[in-house]
Image (spheres, rainbow, N blue to C red):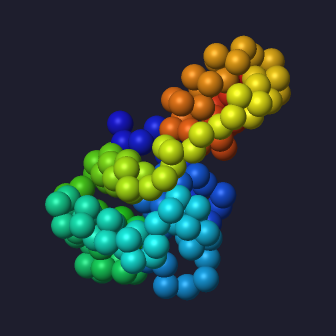
Amino acid sequence: MGWDDAPAHVCRGGDARGLAFCCPPVKPCPVHMKINEIGLTPQEFVKIKEDFAKKTKLKYGASTCFGSFVWCCKDSKPCPLRDMELQANGISHDEYMTLKKQLAEEILKHSNVNTVNYSDDDIQSLADTFNISFDEAKNELESSGNDLKTAIRNLRMKTL
């Protein structure tokens, strides 16, 4: 059903998966820091998104801000232009968000996100913070794609 655990937009503090919802890097904004953080140049980021769009329905959306759904925001953010184009192209919000999830996976596949190596001390600190075992902390990091922010968010949710 779309993308249940979709991250916040990068401009709202979301993790690297949120790059799927970003505009082209043409103005000063958090997208520049996030693409740099994951080891991509602005040109590489644009190429990844444009190449993905060519193969999917994200290539549509001519009346959107940047002329393609690939540059559009998360469906929870109101946008009459995006929604009008989704309807005109016969794309449901679930299908749109599924494509955005696939786009995020494609972006991360070209990034250094999964190459982060946390030390045993880092993992133990995470374990101590959440009063869990070292192995549980390590597993949570791995299942979160080695994204510490996502791992912390998931562990917080589990403690509620």
Rendering quarter of residue 144 = top right
Q: Is residue 91 above or below residue 40?
A: above
Seen at 37% across and 50% down, the residue is 109
Instruction: Indicate whether 62 appears above or below 98.
Output: below
In this rendering, the count of numbered labels is: 0
Query: In the shown orientation, is residue 11 left or right of residue 81?
Result: right
Of all residues, the one furthest to the bottom in this rendering is 27
Closer to the camera in the image, 127 or 82: 127
Report whether residue 108 is seen: yes
Drawn side of residue 142 relative to residue 105, left or right: right
3 shown above or below 160 = below
> In the rendering, at what x and y percent does residue 103 appear?
34, 54
* Relative to 91, 20 lies left or right: right
Residue at point 36% right, 42% down? 2
Give how far across and how far down residue 17 sits, in percent.
Answer: 49, 52
Q: Which residue: 72% across, 14% down?
A: 133
Q: Is residue 84 visible?
A: no
Quadrant placement of the C terminus: top right
Q: Nearer the viewer, residue 80 or 145?
A: 145
- Residue 145 horizontal/vertical position (percent): 51, 38
The quarter of the displayed image where residue 54 is located: bottom left
Foreground pick, 89 / 8: 8
Residue depicted at 66% across the width and 58% down the height? 13
Assign the N terminus to one quadrant of the image: top left
- Please name whichever residue, 28 or 8, is drawn nearer the observer in this view of the structure: 28
The image shows residue 22 at horizontal and vertical percentages of: 48, 67
